[in-house]
Amino acid sequence: MAIEKMISHIKFSLFSPEMVRKLSAEKLLVPDTYNEDGYPIDGGLVDQRLGVIDPGLRCKTCGGRMRSCPGHFGHIELVRPVIHPEFSRVIYVLLKSTCQHCHHILVKKRQRSVVKKKVKKGEVVPGAADLGIITSKEEAVKALESADEAEAPILGSVPLKDAEKVKKVAICAKCDKPQAIVSFVKPSAFYLGKKQLLPSDVRDWLADIPNEELQELGFDPVYARPEWAIITALLVPPVTVRPSITLETGDRSEDDLTHKLVDIMRINQRLEANINAGAPQLIIEDLWELLQYHVTTYFNNETANIPPARHRSGRPLKTLSQRLKGKEGRFRYNLSGKRVNFSARTVISPDPNISINEVGVPMMVAEEMTIPINVTDWNIEACKKLILSEDYPKALYVLRTDGKRAKVTEKTKQEISDNLTSGSIIERQLCDGDTVLFNRQPSLHRISIMRHKVRVMPGKSFRLNLVVTPPYNADFDGDEMNLHVPQTDEARVEAELLMSVEGQVISPRHGHAIIKPQEDFVSGAYFMTRDATEFTREQACQLLAIANITNLPEPDRGQKYSGRLLFSELLPKDLNLKIKSKLGEVIEIKNGLLLKGSLEARAYENELIEKIFHMHGDQAVRTFLDSSTRMCIFGVTLHGFSVDVSNYTIGEESVKKMEAVASKARKEVDGLVMQFKNKTLERLPGRSLRETLEEKIMAILSRARDASGQIIEKDLGMDNNAIIMAKIGARGSILNAIQMSAMVGQQAVRGKRLTRGYGSRPLLHFKKKSLGADAHGFVSSCFKIGLTPQEFFFHSMGGRESLVNTAIRTARSGYMQRRLINALQDMVVQSDRSVRDSRGVLIQYTFGGDGADPKEVGASRQALEKVGEELEPDD
Amino acid sequence: MTKPKKDTLVQTGEAVGIIAAQSIGEPGTQMTMRTFHYAGVAEQVPTGLPRLIEIVDARKTAKKPLMDIYLKHEYANNEEKARAFAESIEGLTLASVAYLEEDFATKKITITIDEEVAKEEGLQISEIVKIIKKLIANATQEKNVVTLKPRTSNLRSLRRLSNKLKALHVKGVPNISRAMILRGPKGFFVRTGGSNLAEVLKREEIDGPALYTNDIKEVEKTLGIEAARNAIVHEINQVLSLQGLDVDVRHLMLLADAMCASGSIKSIGRHGLSGEKAGILARAAFEETLKHLINASVRGEEDKLIGVTENIIIGQTIPVGTGLVRLVMKRTADKKKEAKEEKEE
């Protein structure tokens, strides 16, 4: 589908009153909408010349029906001109920068000092008095009487008390006349000196400014004469822009804009009637101001300094500006982000048995969604079969060559099938292997949307391989995800080439694997590759079969097969590796054979996956991840792997040790407090005594927790499942184990011990001004035994802080990311490898200094990091 | 693992800007908000997300500037000398050695210098008076009391003058409120609260190239835009690595280069980079929608639709990646014509 016409540019300008009249399909006269019969009033605000929104009616301008007529503008002739409030700032600048007498630009203002000199010499300068300059002896005497200044008011000087006031007075270079101060009262009133400038005066003034001078001021007089910012003919948007809704009761409810337009027209009519009746100027001006108010709120109901126009219910009206502005405005809600068809959303659930690039699609979804297929001479028979098919998969619609769309039903299908010609398009249901895009919000990075292949399944949830969980940041506690079906060949090809899951295994953020083993998969990999793991021939066959390997290697442990041997079957034969694992072992792989060491999370993701990706490409990685997931999980299932309370229960001896640690810490803290009270505590550099105390206490208490960590690790040992999980990076951490079985540790708010409360203590269970460990949030119990009420309260204090922080953080980082994206989105690598933005401004000669793609260079990027380290002090 | 270099290059059309923005923005959700206290400086130095936002905003004044001043060998290995240096750069304001009082009736300011404190800091009263007189000549001294009669009659400007006097710098390096020596792997170094690159760089005792400040604006001012760019990369890297987050430097470089491309540091946001973009629609879609539309219409501006947002808005392919490529095809008619021309030749 080629785009035949492209928009090359968009010009912004103002509408002149003539232009408004030309654009208008109808001059509106009646400030009303529908008559009693519910029929649009002629000359009213929903005049049928402005388009139709009611079914059955025809547009009187274009003859179109409800959907086909795009709507047409109308206009209102305002009896008196009114200032467009959004332009009042601009108008103010113009009034200030042009002469109020001759309306030319005030270039090179003649300064007061020049005039002063002339007056001193006795010259008569017109307008000098306006500058506050004393021009006659009488004036000087008068000024002297009222002056309290040392400075004598003499001819040609300015009395000090007026000095500030007349400082800004300038003189026009063209007509030599002094300028009174133009002031602007928001939102739309202008004053010349003290006299108010009526919108008509402003308009005449602005109309008088010559074109060339407007250009100097940054205006484009062809497209935007400033007097056009004063409205005489108000453009009325088509009814399609402000459709009324019919309530269940049959009443019509008009759009906010229509309401506002009715207001404008009413006042406009009253103003006209009063003018014609020769009403006093005061009344006319009042009505004029009211008209100004309605026009102002019509454009922007959040204009500063005026009360917003309200609906009967008290809700402020949503007028033009409000429609455009902000997150829910036209720009961000409808233009930068658009709603789509061909999408589905449901809950996700895990399935380790499908490939990482697949997504399990429920039958219900597959039956509803379609893919267009071009009918050709080669596939016409297959297409006919789809049309005639009784059940899934079938074709739902046919787009005939004449552009008509036909729904395939039981009745019509035979006929449609018989008349099918090549060149038409059938829309068939989603099938296995179709390309779809899968997404989870928030879409924080590009790997939040990836291409998957459809795998139609029973059930009602989308199925997802666990390994692709990290890029989406998904879990299965009720998460929902979205699925989109690309509708053109071009879109499908691009999705396949650029967005396929297997191509995203390495994150562009850091060049390491992001699609990587999770939880039990890591435990499984560890068990498979442990020294002790071996399998019988039968088990080995099962393990290999589940990983799609048909070749059984020679047993390496007598009759039995070691886990490593079986796992090695998954590795490419040219893989060589020798690294130190997180557990401190050496992992050695030679020619695709795992010789030594057991795998843990980091070795797996940072070494195995990355290496395979770089050496053998995305498909090899995909099969490796698919089959190793299945083998590892099957392996760990054979063995059995779980944790329970006993995994977090420590021996009696350790409990005693723990208690000793806690009481020792308490004693140390008490000792410090004593020192503090005796003032024998040594102050740390740059700290007050109190700060020193706090810092030292914190150090002691965190040391206490660390010490208990060691006790625990020793007690529970490496054959404890909980510890294993933490150590190999499958789930949990040593800290979790410490808090569950030893002590929860010091609670903190704002990085400090808990201090807030009455009498310098967080809870009244403690002595006033107590500084000890327990009084300020040291929790020495563990979760398993349970916390004391005080400890529980302290823990909740710390917990609340982290909840609040999370809430604030998401908002703040979301906004930061929006700004980052907005600032950097146009930057693209050019054919000459330079990075430029859309204007062509050079940002980098080569991307990142070396032109390398972070995703491709992976771990070998260390050399480059040196550049960033240049500033690092050499310690 | 080595790949041929050509296989590791970024592809033409790659939207490196968006990738960089995502790579820096996405880990933001994982960052902590906590402040971090550097050993020695009493104030809490922001880290994590607040600090990252601060850098990206290109704030005029960093919240808590600090410097690490590394010393030449003879100072670095001698605690006495290092301490003397630290004391010599610690800045003092007039308010910390004297008591100021405005008399609004007589429109005078009296400064009473605390002799003891001055002595402690090794300051002569005459020195202080000299500095005051530099600012305002109209001062009379009587022992440790200095009286000023400023010319203004305005009470507000009197107040302003008094505040200015309080902040008057009388000793050490301006803006450095605190300096202390710490021991590093290469001997003693000085960590300061507050930062003043230009002045500290003048000092003999320091190891110039190793001098560090976290105040990016100041780096820009004294060392130039290239140094500032490196400082941005370094500071963001610090923030991220402190949180244990892994982001390729190239992304940070792009961000820093974008911020510095104009020759001065531009912030990320409506007052900086985003506010200067070419497209009216793009600016309107970001922030301050009305302002941009109003100004564009008065000036008769034209949106050339060259950016990403603009093209999304009007529904055309965006000029990024595969959307950057245009296909030129010869029609059969043209081909025939060409063949004919060739034949004729």
Image (cartoon, helix red, strand yellow):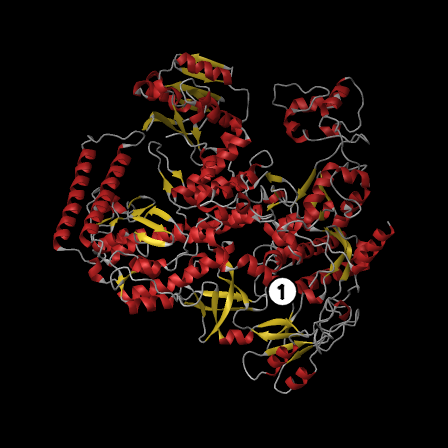
In-image side of B76 versus A840 (left or right): left
Considering the numbered disc 1 on the image, is that residue within a helix, a strand or a loop?
Answer: helix
Residue A396 in view (yes/no): yes
Q: Is residue A278 above or below residue A352?
A: above
Choose top left, top right, bottom left or bottom right for residue A550.
bottom left
Q: Is residue A282 above or below residue A247?
A: above
Which residue appears farthest toward the right when viewing the image? B344
Amino acid beneath label 1: Asp
Q: Residue at x 63, y 65 (%)?
A: A488
Chain assignment, label 1: A
Q: How far across and down, in percent of the image, does residue A315 sit?
A: 57, 62
Q: How far across and down, in percent of the image, does residue A703 sit?
A: 23, 42
Q: Dot 1 corresponds to which residue?
A: A489
Which residue appears farthest toward the bottom when viewing the image? A411
Residue A321 in view (yes/no): no
In-image side of A151 versus A850 (left or right): right
Choose top left, top right, bottom left or bottom right for residue A150.
top right
Q: How far across and down, in percent of the image, does residue A368 sit?
A: 55, 75
Residue A860 versus residue B183: which sits nearer the camera? A860
Q: Judge the density around disc 1: few (<14), some (14-19), many (≥20) Cα neighbours within 10 Å.
A: few
Of the 4 image quadrants, the one containing the C terminus of chain A is: top left
In-image side of A696 versus A865 (left or right): left
Of the 4 image quadrants, the one containing the N terminus of chain A is: bottom right
